[in-house]
Image (tube, rainbow, N blue to C red):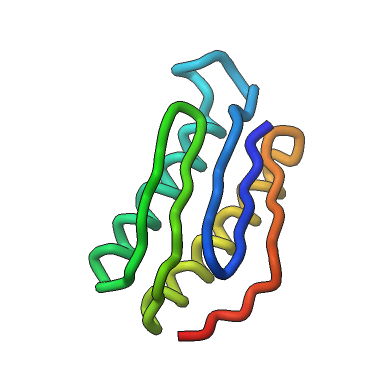
Amino acid sequence: MTTIKITPQEIEVSGHSGYDERGKDIVCAAISTLTQATYNYLRKTDNSVVLQDSEGYYLIELLKLNYYGSEIIGSYIEMVEDLVSQYPLYLKIEKGRIEWKN
């Protein structure tokens, strides 16, 4: 199972979904693509973020977000919730208290 933890300070994605074998896992591919795209959009809109990644793990540190960054994170949360509702046996979301203060 892949766990997505979201707090005002960071987004952490860890584990493998187990939906299919490595290289064929559409659930893992979806959450990985979504997380990488979110990081890229945050960076391109002048937000202060740091990415750590390795096999089966992403950590995006949200150091300072502007208005666009807050909107991007809101969209990320909505898309992750959609994926979790479609694949509840393979994805889990944990949200800390979300209060975006810039």
Residue at image location 69% in from the left, 33% down from the top: 90
Q: Nearer the viewer, residue 102 or 38?
A: 102
Quadrant (top left, top right, bottom left, bottom right) of the N terminus: top right
- The total number of labels drawn is 0
Q: Residue lying farthest right? A: 89
> In the picture shown, does residue 52 fall above or below 25?
below
Above or below residue 84? Residue 11 is: below
Q: Quadrant of the C terminus?
A: bottom left
Which residue is rendered at x = 58% and y = 63% of the image? 78
Q: Nearer the viewer, residue 41 or 27?
A: 41
Residue 17 sits in which quadrant?
top right
Report which quarter residue 63 is drawn in: bottom left
The answer to whether 24 appears left or right of 38 in the picture is right
Image coords of residue 15 (percent x, y): 60, 31
Q: What is the x, y in percent for residue 89?
A: 76, 34
At a point 51% along the width and 61% down the height, the residue shown is 76
Q: Using residue 45 as the reference point, say whether residue 17 is left or right of it.
A: right
Q: Position of residue 47 (x, y in %)?
A: 32, 71
In the displayed image of the protein, which residue is found farthest to the top? 21
Give the residue displayed 48% in from the left and 19% down from the top.
24
Q: Is residue 16 left or right of residue 24?
A: right
Q: Is residue 40 positioned above or below 98 on the image?
A: above
Drawn side of residue 68 relative to residue 11, left or right: left
Expressed as whole percent of the image width and height from the top left, the position of residue 91 reads 67, 40
